[in-house]
Each structure stands twice: as structure tokens, then as C-alpha cells.
Amino acid sequence: MEQKKVPLVVIRRLPRYYRYLSDLNDMGIERISSQVLSKKLGFTASQVRQDLNFFGGFGQQGYGYNVKSLRNEISKILGLDKHYKVVVIGAGNLGHAILNYPGFAKRGFKFVGIFDNNPDLIGKKAGNLTVMNIDDLEEFCEKDHPDIGALTIPKESTANMAKKLEAFGFKGLWNFSHVEITSSLPVETVHLTDSLMTLAYKISSSAVDD
Amino acid sequence: MEQKKVPLVVIRRLPRYYRYLSDLNDMGIERISSQVLSKKLGFTASQVRQDLNFFGGFGQQGYGYNVKSLRNEISKILGLDKHYKVVVIGAGNLGHAILNYPGFAKRGFKFVGIFDNNPDLIGKKAGNLTVMNIDDLEEFCEKDHPDIGALTIPKESTANMAKKLEAFGFKGLWNFSHVEITSSLPVETVHLTDSLMTLAYKISSSAVDD
DNA sequence: TAGATTGTTAATCGATTAACAATC
DNA sequence: TAGATTGTTAATCGATTAACAATC
């Protein structure tokens, strides 16, 4: 779809555009200029136009951008027009939290299973699902072909599990353990600890100077 | 502590150094060169030396870096030598997950309270804590002076709650709702939805080309 | 048409990489 | 001492910002 390689830093801004355009659309606003859009998002107008023009000329001179159609374009770029079956690996607190996090479903992410190896958890309810035995994952995949595996297991087991998921035909990994996964699959890691450490830095450095 | 303004992109790499150096230290390894360190972390040796030299000359020509002392220096830079009292606002699944997330405690983060406005949740156990009434937060703060507020509440309430926490003397906000908080306090936001959307992009773009 | 705002090229800024003298 | 590796300056690369002709 894209011609030149789009920098990851641009991609990471797309969800912000998408969310804000969704809000505007819900508010019934039809058009917006790069100027106004940039103000709201804390970008520059130039940056907005540069970002969007990686993917095509969505705007119109003298008018700006149509909110609904721009939202839809970004949605397509992000792949949100497709549907993804998500499986959660690890039925701890974090697994439950992700499963029940509101807002995923309406963006095409459907949670189809949650697995654990702990006998105490297997069979328990989790949202509308029941925790399944991790040993049954392979069979489950053969039938259901899930797309995304959300890994909320201890870091010791993560590398191994990542390999398994790859073999089972998953298309991407959403990783919550603080381990850098090496996989040929696309991986997106959420580093909670790193985020908290960064906050600690901001706090302690802002206390010292300025 | 630092002379020149350190780019945030450098700060965000520090936790990775810190984690890896901790691992090395646990393994009993005493020294490491920028060369070897960079390989493991996927940086370049130049970048490692540049990063570290924002804060001072921690290395020694012909030798490299002492693992333990470098780890300690980074720990100090990140402010991990200090202690932080963390309060969780919102006792849903995500609040529980954060509270019980292993590894925070040993880095100086101590969870001292969890609050909610839902009568069904108030009084319930959460880790070693009991969910308290959000109305009692102010009084709690006057006595306990917590440092960090972890916001796991719906985005509609987040902006307001952020203002309150600022007034109550919090020093930093760890935000899990997809709202850009404007506060004079340091804020670190974890965008779960954005992260999942980015994964969707990676999946759908890798499916198309290369 | 005149005004507004894009798409796009050029200029600037900042971050990464390369190179090497200093030195342990 | 000789070898290794840092700290730091200079060169390169990439991303952001500015500017403006094209055009709705």
C-alpha cells in the first residue's frame, strides 16, 4: 500500500490521529485543517501534512481534510478494517485486565481464548471465556486460527512460548513481559517496568532542576 | 545532575541498560565493553558510549565498564535509589494487575493504597491491601504523602482526577487511560490501545509486502 | 474570483554513526 | 610496553519545520 518505507515514528502517531478523528466524527464535525488538527495533537501542521502524505493525498486545497474519510483511510492503513482473533496466554491479573479492557472489540479485535498452565486457574471464568489448558492450545489453533497472541506470562517462559505461537500459525505477538523477543513474527512489546522507571526519572529530574 | 538537556529518547533507553546490566551482575559478570553491550541490546557501540557520556565518563579506556558500578550509576540517574509510594486509582482488573505486577517492589516502588468509587469494590482485598473509598483519598494523602498515582479509571474521569492528584501533592502520574493528560506534574502514559493498533499495522503491512 | 489550505520541495534541526586521539 | 577501549569531535543520516507554488 505504501511506496516509501514509512518510519515507525510516523506509524506510532497514526493511532493518535485515529482516536482524535473518531472523537471529531462522533461530535459531528465534518472537516478539519492540518492547522487545527496539529494544535490538538501537539504536532505541527507541517508534520501532519507530511505524515498523511506518506500514504496519499487525503486533503483538498482550500478545504482541509474530511474527518470521516480521513479516519477511514487511517483505519485502513492501520489494518483496523480487518478482524483479528486474539488469544491471551496467561490468566493472571494482567491477562484478565487485557481481556476485559474496553474498546478493543469495536476496533476489530476479538478475544477468542485464554490459556494458562496453572490447574487452579483452568476452568475458571474470565470475561465471557473460560480459562483453557495451555496444552490444548495447539489443537485450538488448528480449529480456530487465532491471529494475535497476548503474552502475559513470566519472562522465563516467554521466549519459548513465542516460538510455539509462531509454529501454531499466529501472525503477531503482543508481549507484556520485559524480554526482547526475537521472532520472525511482528512483535509489539509493552514495557510496564520501563515506563515506570521513565516516570521515576522525570520525577527525580524535575525535582532537581527547572 | 546532568549538564545538557538529555533527549527523552536516551532516557527511554536507560531502563534497557539497567535491566541488562542487572542480569549480567546477577550472573557474576564484572566488566563489559560498549561493543558487547551494544550487540546484546541492538544498539551500536557508538550509541552506547554517547548515551552514557551524557551523564559522565563511567568507563575506563582499555577496560570497558564495570557492570556493577555502571548499573548503580544508571539506577541513580533513573532515580531508582529513591523510594516511591504508589497509589492505584481504580480497582478494576488493570488496577489489580499493576498492584500485583512482580518486580516493582524491588526497584523502590511501594504500593501503599488502592482506591475506587464503586461500593461493590470498596472493602475488597487487593494484594495485601484493601480497596478504599476514593472520597477518603485526600485524607489518606495528608497522612501518607504518596508520590505516584497510577490512573486506571475511565478516560472521562481521568482529567479531573489528575487535577485532584496534583492538588493532593502527588509528584507524578502514571496514566493508563487513552487521554493525553495536561498537568504540570510529570506524566507517563501507557497507551495499550495504540500499542495494539501498531501491532495491527505491523501485521497487515508485513502480510502485504516483504 | 479571492481566500484558504494542501502537497511538496528545500532548510533546519537533532540523533546516530564513524573515526581517532587519549589513556588505562 | 602493546593492545584494547574509552571519550569526544566530526560526518552522516533521518526527521521535523519552513516556505511556497499549485489548486480547490
Image (cartoon, coloured by chain):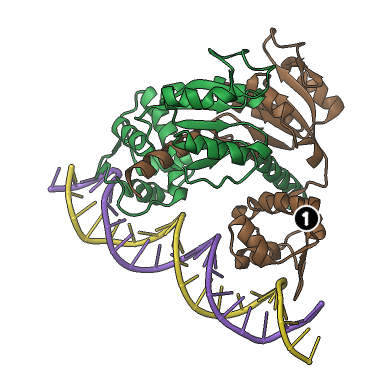
Chain colours: A green, B brown, C purple, D yellow
Above or below, comparing residue B141 to residue B194 in the picture: above
Q: Quadrant of residue A90?
A: top right
> Circle 1: is it few (<14), some (14-19), or many (20+) Cα within 10 Å?
many
Question: Is residue B165 at least partly visible in the picture?
Answer: yes
Residue located at (33% from left, 54% from top)? A4
Residue occupied by mark 1: B71
Q: Quadrant of the N terminus of chain B?
A: bottom right
Farthest right residue?
B143
User: Which kind of residue does numbered mark 1 sit on?
Assistant: Arg
Residue located at (37% from left, 35% from top)? A79
Camera-nearest residue between A93 and A7: A93
Q: How many marks?
A: 1
Camera-nearest residue between B144 and B126: B126
Question: Is residue B168 at least partly visible in the picture?
Answer: no
Above or below, comparing residue B9 to residue A14 in the picture: below
Camera-nearest residue between D8 and A4: A4
Q: Secondary structure at mark 1?
A: helix
- Image position, residue B80 (x, y; %): 78, 46
Q: Quadrant of residue A118?
A: top right
Above or below, comparing residue B124 to residue B1 in the picture: above
Q: Quadrant of residue A95?
A: top right
- The chain to which mark 1 is attached is B
